[in-house]
Image (cartoon, helix red, strand yellow):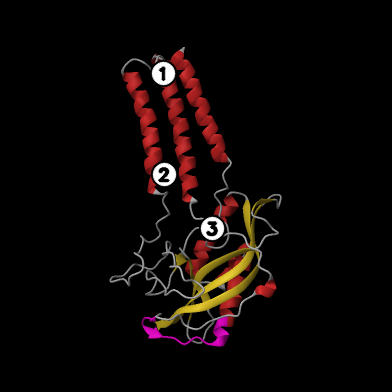
Amino acid sequence: MLSTLAFKHFTRALVLILSLSMVAIPDAQARLGDRGSMGSRGSNTFSAPPATQTAPRPAAPIERSITQPANPQRPGFSAPPVQQPQAAPSFARSFMGGLAGGFLGAGLFGLLSGHGFMGGMGGFMSLLGLLFQAALIAGLIFLVVRLFRRSEPQPAYVDTPTSARAPLDMTPASGGGNRLQPLTIQDQDYSEFERLLISVQDAYSREDIAALRGLATPEMVSYLGDDLAANSQRGLVDKVSNVKLLQGDLSEAWHENGSDYATVAMRFSFINVMVERSSNRVVEGNPNQVQEAVEIWTFRRVPGGHWILSAVQHTQ
């Protein structure tokens, strides 16, 4: 009787934890590139871009890139394995692994000692209890690991009126030290960077892959397409609107292997909501609140051609 009661309490506790886990925010892509930094910056892909007034904090390392790491690297951050998916933090793995191992180890010990999985339950019923609880624990581990993967904090919502827009400062950051052949950026280039910021976000929000192909490198289009497909599988659409550049400055610009590169820090405001595809119902975000972010975007062009998006990095 005691072991049966303990089994019931254990099952109820697991069901309660699983129910609470289900209340978490959907594991969906919120805004362009929010799953991590991605793309290529030529020879500078795995080197930290110089800090600027707009982005004084270090840039996050690029996690998805077709560029192969090269040594030696400039100090800043180490190059992660190419195209490796983000793994759950080691704390989640070790904690949940220890929890599951403790429960299953205790249950197996009970079976071998003749007391059943939770004590007192014998034979076939004890084996069924072991299998049932193992399945519940496996489901719990899967959900909790998914929650830990969404560990990056979202930027705070702020009310940023259009009239508060700051003048752009596009002078090179002090101590930038461009690598390879230095490149001079003109006023019209800065206007094109601002246009691309708005156009890329708009095309992403409309899920317009054809438009993205004219605004970004094939590599970036493939990553953004993967993120949009992940949203579609969950029946969600990521809506980004009212994108406004508030401040920007140049981190570094250079020429290599027949291409020009410019890395620009940008602070911009926007409205972002996740809506249900079938009903257009907002399931995440607030359509009446303005959000602000600071990101580092790298653009690439063939000399004499148009700039296109080559990489997006968040700040740490």
Left or right side of 239 for 41: left
Of the numbered discs 3 and 1, the one sitting upstream in the chain is 1
Q: Give the residue type at disc 3.
A: Asp
**Which residue reaches farthest left?**
72
- Judged from the image, the secondary structure of the residue bearing numbered disc 1 is helix
Distance in Å between CA atoms under marks 1 and 2? 29 Å
Q: Give the residue type at disc 2.
A: Ala
- Judged from the image, the secondary structure of the residue bearing numbered disc 2 is helix
Left or right side of 291 for 79: left
Q: Which residue is mark 2?
A: 92
Q: Give the residue type at disc 1.
A: Ser
Q: Which residue is mark 1?
A: 126
Left or right side of 93 for 290: right
Label ID, residue 227? 3
Q: Can the viewer see residue 206 in this picture? A: no
Circle 2 crowding by C-alpha within 10 Å: few under 14, some 14–19, many from 20: some
Of the numbered discs 1 and 2, the one sitting upstream in the chain is 2
Q: Identify the magenta region.
A: 177-190
Give the residue displayed 40% in from the left and 66% down from the top: 66
Image depth: mark 3 or mark 2 in front? 2
Q: Is residue 301 magenta?
A: no
Give the residue displayed 59% in from the left and 81% down from the top: 191
- Judged from the image, the secondary structure of the residue bearing numbered disc 3 is helix
Residue 31, percent from left and from top: 58, 60
Circle 3 crowding by C-alpha within 10 Å: few under 14, some 14–19, many from 20: many
Distance in Å between CA atoms under marks 3 and 1? 44 Å
The residue nearer to you, when weighing 48 against 137, is 48
Give the residue displayed 52% in from the left and 34% down from the top: 17
**Which residue reaches farthest top?**
1
